[in-house]
Image (cartoon, rainbow, N blue to C red):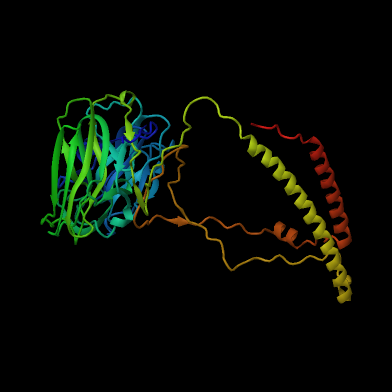
Amino acid sequence: MTAPASPSDPDEPVAIVIGAIRLYDISTAAPGYWYDEASDTDRCGSVPNWVLQLDGRAITLYGVSPPDVPQCNQTIAVASPTNPRANMTSAKTYVPYTWPAPAFGGELYTTGRLPDPTTMELGLLGYRGVALHYALVEVGEFTNLTGQTILVDDTSTEIAWRGGWKSKAAGEYASLTKVNCQLPISTPSKPDNLTFTPFTATMFPHGNSTHATGTKGDEFEFHFAGTSINVYGVAPGAVNSQSWQLEMVFSLDGTTNTTQTYTASSNTDNYAGPGLLTNYLYFSATHLSAGNHTLVGTILDVAGTEGTMAHIDYLTYEPSFATMHEKPKFSVSSGSSNTTDSGGGGGTRQPASTNGGGGHSDPPVGGIVGGVLGGVVAIGLLIFGLVWNARRKRHRASEAATSNPNLGRLSSNFSAPIEFDNSSPSVYEPFIAQPSFSPPSGSASAKRCGPDTSANTSPEIPQIGDGDEQRANTASPVPSNTTQSAELDTRVRDLQREVDMLRRQMVPPPEYE
C-alpha cells in the first residue's frame, strides 16, 4: 500500500551554505587566512574588526571556538544586522557575546531574523583564535540562488524517514566526537611567524541532532530540484576501530543504484580517542541533469561492533531553480514514517485526521439534550449540598459553644496569620544572557549544546513590599455563624427560583426515528 503523500512545509526557512573559502573571499575586512583546507582560521594577534557581507535574512556561523588560553578571548564583540544601532566602523556599537564553550565545535553564533531579506553586514571584534568552517544564510523568496548550495537539516519536513530511525540529540555525541586541533598563534610584530598550540575540541552535529538507525531495511527519501546531491552525517563507528561495517544503497530516480560500504579508518592522526567523525560524507552525486530528482537511502547490512549505525545529519544540493519563488513543491510520503525520539528533538509526525466526503455534518442532538439534563441534575445536587452544609455548620457551632464557653469571647475581627509552605520551594529556571539589542519579532533562537559559559541571571522573585505587608497584617472581620447561615439560606432560595425558571423554559426534545 502506498503511503499517503503530504506537502513539505512551505514556511520552512531555506538556507544556503557558504564554505570557508568563500567566507574569506566575501569579507570586507578579513584578517584571517586559509589553513589546513578545513577552516578560515584567524591569527591570535592584534586584529581589527572582521565584517562579513551577505544577502539574506539571517546568518549563522559554524566552526570551532578557541581553547581557554590567555592569548584568545571567550567573549567577543558583535555588530549584528538586526541591531539598528550597529555601525561596522564604530566599536562603541558592538555588543558582547560569549562563545557557547571553549574548544566547542558547532553552531557558534546566530543573528536575529530580519523581516525582509537585504544585504546584511555582520561585524566581529576580539575573535582571536576562532576557526570558521562555514556559514548558513537564510534566503528570501527572490534571493539569487545561481551557483549556491542549499543545506537541508535532518529535522526538515522535506525528508521522509521510514522504519526505526531515531532522532539523536547532540548531547549523546559529546563524549564520542572529540577531535585533536592545532591553534595557530602569531604576534603583531611577526604576523607570519606562527606557533601551534594543540588542544582537543568537542564537535557536535549540525543543528544539534541526527537521525540514526542500525536496522536493515530502514530508509529515507528526499525530493529535490538540482544538479548535485550530498549526504553528510556522523561516522557509523569509531575511527580507530577495525571491528565494524555498514552497507547502504542509494537510489536516484529509481534507476541508478549505488552501493556504499563503510568501514573503520586507521587514520587517527587528527582525532582523539575512539572518536566519531562529524561531517562524514555518506553519498555524493554530481553532474545530474537539471530538474526534479528523488533520492532514497536504504540500510543493507550492519556488522561488527554493537552500536554501529548510520547517523544522517544533513543534505546539500545545488538547486536548478534561480529563486525560492521557482522552487518546486514536492509531496513527501510521510504516512509510513516511524521516527522515534531519543531525548532530543524530532518524534513521530502524525497526519491530521480528516472527515470522509464533503458537505456538512449534523449537530449532535443527543449530546445537546444530555448536556441540558445533566446541568439540571448538577444544579439539584448543588442545592442539596448547600442546604446540608448549612445545617451541619449550625449543628457544629452549637456543640462548640456548649463545650468551650471561652470561644464566644474571641474578637469578631480576629485574623489568623498567613502561612507559607516552605517544604517544596518553587524552582526558577535561569535565563541565558543575550546580547543587549532586541532582535525583531519572530527571530529564530539559537540552538546551543554542550557546556554554556555565558552569564546566567535568575529572574527576580517577587517580594512582599511594605504596602503588601501592611495589607496582609490588616485585620479583616470574619463573619459570625449566624450571618453566614442567613447568607447561605438566601443563596439557596435564589438557586431554587432559578431552577424553577429553567424547568418552565425547558421544552421536551423532539422524537427521532
Among all residues in the image, which is located at the extreme left?
A: 266
Q: Nearer the viewer, residue 198 or 149?
A: 149
**Could you tell me which residue is drawn at 18 percent across and 39 percent down?**
250
Residue 69's place in the image compared with 402, above or below, is: above
Quadrant showing the C terminus: top right
Vertical position of residue 175 compared to residue 40: above or below: below
Residue 496 location in percent, x, y? 83, 46
Q: Is residue 111 left or right of residue 395?
A: left
Which of the 4 image quarters holds residue 401?
Answer: bottom right
Give left or right: position of 196 versus 462: left
Please give the name of the residue rendered at 75% of the width and 52% of the height, measured from the top-left corner. Answer: 381
Task: Residue 187 in the image: state x and y as whole percent.
Answer: 20, 52
Residue 11 showing in the rendered view: yes
Point out residue 52 in the picture as x, y percentages from the top left corner: 29, 37
Q: Is residue 23 visible?
A: no
Residue drawn at (23%, 42%) of the image: 31
List x then y, in percent, for residue 148. Answer: 24, 31
Residue 156, image quadrant: top left
